[in-house]
Amino acid sequence: MLDVGLMRYLSGMLNGRIHPVEVKSGATGSLRSLHLFLASYPECGKALVFSDHPYAELPEQKISFLPLSSAFAATKGE
């Protein structure tokens, strides 16, 4: 079982592109590792951050925040 208290990167494949995925349990945190990953691999797709917060997007940083309950829909069940 995934412990949402710890950050985990998963390789999510959507529309033929790899997207970094992070699961967060709290509001604190700077997503420093995620930003480092995006800077190191600029050709990857946008990052998906699943948490208990509502949907939000930071297009200039290539990050989408999604409610944890939407994880299945975001991957289209793949």
Image (cartoon, helix red, strand yellow):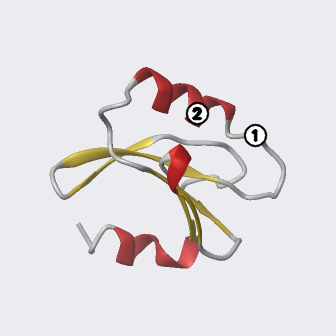
For this view, does 41 lie left or right of residue 29?
left
Along the line of sight, which residue is nearer the eye, 61 or 17?
61
- Say whether residue 15 is left or right of residue 19: left
Residue sitting at x 73%, y 58%? 25
Residue at image mark 1: 30
Out of 45 and 6, give the one closest to the viewer: 45
Q: Is residue 76 above or below residue 29?
A: below
Residue 38 x %, y % = 47, 32
User: Residue 3's mark?
Assistant: none
Residue 66's x, y, as percent?
A: 55, 69
* Lateral position of residue 74 relative to residue 32, left or right: left
The residue under the point 61% across, 30% down is 33
Which residue is outermost to the right? 28
Q: How many marks?
A: 2
Name the residue furthest front.
Answer: 60
- The amino acid type, in three-letter code, at marker 1 is Ser
Whether residue 15 sits left or right of residue 40 in the image: it is left
Q: Furthest-left residue in view?
A: 16
Q: Amino acid at mark 2?
A: His
Q: Residues within 10 Å of mark 1 (few under 14, many from 20)?
A: few
**Residue at point 68% right, 44% down?**
6
What distance separates the C-alpha of mark 1 from that of mark 2? 9 Å
Mark 2 Cα-neighbour bin, 10 Å: few <14, some 14–19, many ≥20: some
Along the line of sight, which residue is nearer the eye, 62 or 50? 62
Q: What element does badge 2 sit on?
A: helix
Q: Earlier in the sequence, mark 1 or mark 2?
A: 1
Residues marked 1 and 2 touching at CB (< 8 Å): yes
- Residue bearing the label numbered 2: 35
Q: Regarding mark 1 in the picture, which secondary structure is present there?
A: loop
| Quadrant including the C terminus | bottom left
- Residue at 69% x, 71% y is 52
